[in-house]
Image (spheres, rainbow, N blue to C red):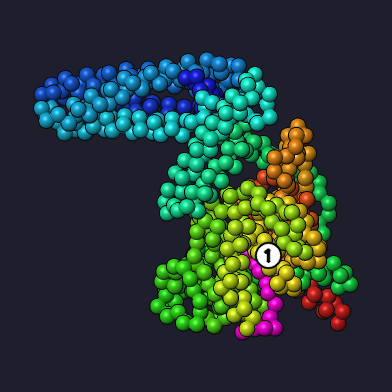
Amino acid sequence: MPGLVVFGRRWAIGSDDFVLPGTFELFLRLLWWLGIVVLYAVHKGQFSCPGGALLHSYLLVLLALLAAIICTLCALVYVSMQGTISNPGPRKSLPKLLYTRLLLYLPEFIWAVVGAVWVSDSSVRCESTVINVILGTVIASWVIIVFTIIGVLIVFDPLGGKKTFYLTDGLDRNLESSQSGQLLYNVKNTATRVWEKRIRLMCCCIVQDDDHRVAFTSIAELFRAYFSDTDLVPSDIAAGLILLHQEQDKMESCPKEPEEVLCHSPSSLVADDLDIELENAAHYMLFAAAAYGWPYYIYTNPFTALCKLNGDCCRSRPEDCDITGSDRRNFHFGSILRITGLQYRDFIHISFHNKIYEIPFFVALDHKKEAIVVAVRGTLSFEDILTDLSADCEDLTLEDVLENGFVHKGITQAANYIYQKLINDGILNQAFTIAPEYKLVIVGHSLGGGTASVLAIMLRNSFPTLKCYAFSPPGGLLSTQLENDDALTQPLLAEESLMVHRSPSYNALDGESHLNSPPQYPHLYLPGRIIHIVEESSSRRLCSSDIKYSANWSNETVFSSILISPKMITDHMPDVVLNALNSLSQEHRSCISYGVSSAV
């Protein structure tokens, strides 16, 4: 649905988007009008006081104004309901109704000012009840006016007047090449500045330095490149998600293949490999979750976490533990200790420092698995969101590991920051001095998972036997496969709740470019071996739920499409991933126990 054109410019709203807001305002206006009628009828004989004539005139004019506004809103809602997304013709009269509605705001605004002056006039000596009634109507008028102004600002598109000029770079225009190029350049700069201002406004609560400004510009250019040639309004996105969800429901109702049981025969090497990696992944996911600190601990233990953490806050930190960044009242470190079950002496380095491209991490000794674990935190702050959104491509070449590869810019910057800390500050040397026989394992979830993957590639030459467990990492990470398939054999976990099968209706969301045109950006994939966890069945009880999962080896091409699921946000949460891994690991152990008992 194209954006509505009013006052000669495009707005970020469609002609069929006025049904809900118009109905809501109509409901409020009707209640307000009926309330004033009732109050006027009750207090009709109480306007004989000094100044009462002014208040009486105010109510009568306000009733007439509200009646005109209500009639206009009825027509606006009715016309907006006509036609369809592909047939906007029946709504062609909507701009005229909008002009009429906006014109009525002028007398409403003037009358709200007049009412505010009259009700505050000291010469008016009517009863307090009458004064309060008029004051309430004046306040209601101002509230509606303010919310209307906010709504106009939200749907205002600063580029609406230039939308037809900045479509694509390759179009042949009836202008001289120099004029056309300069026009496109100016409009693109304007679009970039608009997106940059929007991002700055959303991130106004964080301190902004040079790194932030560079990130804002990079993200703004990326958004401008993706959205400059589209004529979409927010309702289009909502409608698309609803249609995809309906398609998903149809696919879920189709007959499925018989469910496979995860308990494999011990003779299957592939099954044994999967079972071993699932057990390892369940173990290391605990470290990836612990990197989130107290927010994760309180989220998973809402009734007891604060009491336990308050008991830890008064403990003094050990002097031999290297901690950087702010951790007020020891909440982060106390949460990490409780989640991992480690001791103070097991931590080599902990960083709570958080900026754009610089995310928290910790290095600890895992005596159970005899590993030095580097755990990277996922998205938890505005700075992390900016790192996620810095999704432009960046070149990366590593000898014997990756050649002429493209990687996610923000994640690569974050991985490089941690790499410099681990190597240049001697953190890993210190760890291997304490435990020289231990292996190196890098873990992370979400943004931390993507960072852990790139960091593992950077460390591969120095530590050939390292392992990386990346949980629910971003799909667009690397443009090429690793030079040596055995060089990085860690599993990467990806979650999928309901969308198990692929549908042709999702082809528009594939990595393939529209109309077979050459892609602007290279395809980015997940690296390494991938374990795909799928929710097979779920049963809800009063205070608990029983969910059954399955897991299989997968490949990066399976995750080249965007699949919509109502649980895609919750399935990404670290506690859900950890619970799924624990469930699969326990199921594997129970299968082994059952097999041994049967053999006996």
- Circle 1: is it few (<14), some (14-19), or many (20+) Cα within 10 Å? many
Q: Residue furthest front?
A: 178
Q: Is residue 112 above or below residue 492?
A: above
**Residue occupied by mark 1:** 458
Residue visible at 75% across and 59% down in the picture: 402
Residue 109 percent location from the top left of the image:
31, 24
- Give percent across and percent down for residue 123: 10, 27
Q: Residue 477, can we see it?
A: no
Q: Using the rendered view, name the quadrant where residue 251 is placed.
A: top right
- Magenta part of the protein: which range? 434-445
Whether 1 is among the magenta residues is no
Q: Residue at x 56, y 18 (%)?
A: 91
Identified by mark 1, the residue type is: Met
Residue at (54, 31) in percent of width and height: 186
Nearest the camera: 504 or 308?
Answer: 504
Q: Is residue 443 magenta?
A: yes
Question: Measured from the top left, where is residue 96 in percent x and y?
Answer: 47, 15
164 vs 563, nearest the viewer: 164
Secondary structure of the residue carrying numbered label 1 = helix
Count of number-bearing discs: 1
**Residue 11 versus residue 201: which sits nearer the camera?**
201
- Which corner quadrant holds the N terminus? top right
Frontmost residue, 480 versus 528: 480
Residue at the image position 52 percent from the left and 15 percent from the top: 93
Q: Residue furthest right?
A: 267
Specify whether residue 488 is in view.
yes
448 w.r.t. 247: above or below? below
The x, y position of residue 496, in whole percent, is 70, 53
